[in-house]
Image (tube, rainbow, N blue to C red):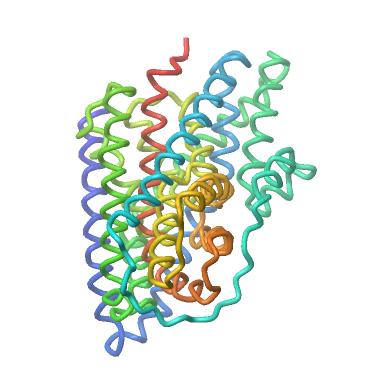
Amino acid sequence: MSQKKKASSLRITLAIFVGLILGIIFGLLMPGRFDWMQPVITLITNLYMNALRMMIYPLVFCSLIVGIKGIGSVSATGKIGGQSVLYYVITTLVASLIGLFLPKALGLGQGVKIEMIESNVEATPFTSLLDTVQSLIPSNPIASFAEGNMLQVLVFAIIIGITCLAVGEKAKPVVDLAEAINEISIKIISVVMYFTPIGVFCSISGVIYANGTETIIELGKVLIALYLAMFGYLFIFYGLIVRTLGKCSIRKFFVTILPAALNAFGTCSSSATLPISKRCADELEVPNEISSLALPLGATINMDAVSILMSFMIVFFANACGVEINFGMLAIVLLSNTLLSIGTPGVPGGAIASFAALASIAGLPTGVMGVYISINTLCDMGATCCNVVGDLACSVAMKETAKIK
């Protein structure tokens, strides 16, 4: 990457960080002083999120077709996809273990009195993974795009990409069109990147304003412990993967992926961060053939931090409510959490229904859902940031483990 591009990337990263800090401060000051700004903040946040979402599916679909065509063989495509899935399943299991045993060892939630808040949330059925597998192949690809079903879009793109490989020269017009749309998408995202500091400022200030300082203070201890667990996992586990498997400098990795991490923290959406993640992967010199498959797949099934979050909260609420969770139940929660996390959508609030299912499995009172929802966004910010970093760590690792010849 040229010095000019490095300087530009650094300026954007610093601007995003400043936007994040100022957004937190402004969110704390808004109640009673700047309430009239809330509709404006919401408007700007929605415009920014829509600008990102506008290009998610064209970018993912077309970059995947181009990437598969660039790989050059069906076997190599299967190798990349298989390694990605294996990586995400293993890291999710490790994350779930940390989320279960750390709060239990620390005794978090013991002696805490929680005021139950009733909330009607439909739990994600435990068969969600089976339902996901059953509906992998879209009966109506256009509907998959319209409904935002990322997994079906991925499968459809893979089918088209592999077919283009099989057809050969006759598929060149389709591949050329995909390349053109891919380049257009990247250009639009590059422009949107300049507005990211404003988007993150408005997103985070709206989150702080909506939750209020009292909620933050009351649940401060568990949030601090949760964030220490998630970011400890992020820096130690992902850092180890990047250094040992990816043969990449840990400092270089974390500096380069900062724009994606900060955007994910501010927007609570790994799917909406995909275009920025792709740009960060390009700066880390991850081949398009790898990043175009590993990143969208990660945004769909890599929910490491969601596993930590849900396991953490199950143990916390169990201790607070006096519900005994023995090691047998821990094993059931661990397996359930891993399967449910894979089916959790990479959008704000995507973990709520999955948590409702886990709470039911663990035998927690339904009233805990109201409390969980009140802090979900605060938890979701760190979890989304961690997940996005995990997606990029996978891409960097696979640059070495799934070398494209």
Residue at 21%, 59% (x, y): give it.
18
Residue at the far bottom: name it: 32
Q: Which residue is at 55% across, 39% downward? A: 60
Residue 249: x and y, percent?
A: 22, 27
Which percent across, then down, holds residue 254? Answer: 25, 39
**Left or right: where 350 falls relative to 246:** right
Q: Quadrant of the N terminus?
A: top left
Q: Is residue 324 visible?
A: yes
> Where in the figure is residue 310, as x and y percent of width and height?
45, 57
Most extreme residue toward the top, as rendered? 405
Q: Is residue 111 above or below residue 168?
A: below
Is residue 177 left or right of 299 when viewed as pictured? right
Q: Residue at x 70, y 20 (%)?
A: 171
Residue at point 26%, 77% (across, down): 28
Residue 55 visible here: no
Say which of 220 and 161 sits in front.
220
Q: Nearer the viewer, residue 44 or 335?
A: 335
Q: To which quarter of the image does residue 315 belong?
A: bottom left
Task: Compare residues 88 and 399 and report the one nearer the observer.
Answer: 88
Answer above or below: position of 391 versus 305: above
Percent position of residue 320, x then y: 38, 71
Q: Nearer the viewer, residue 267 or 188?
A: 267
Name the image quarter holding residue 29: bottom left
Number of marks drawn:
0
- In this rendering, the answer to whether 299 lies above or below 51 is above
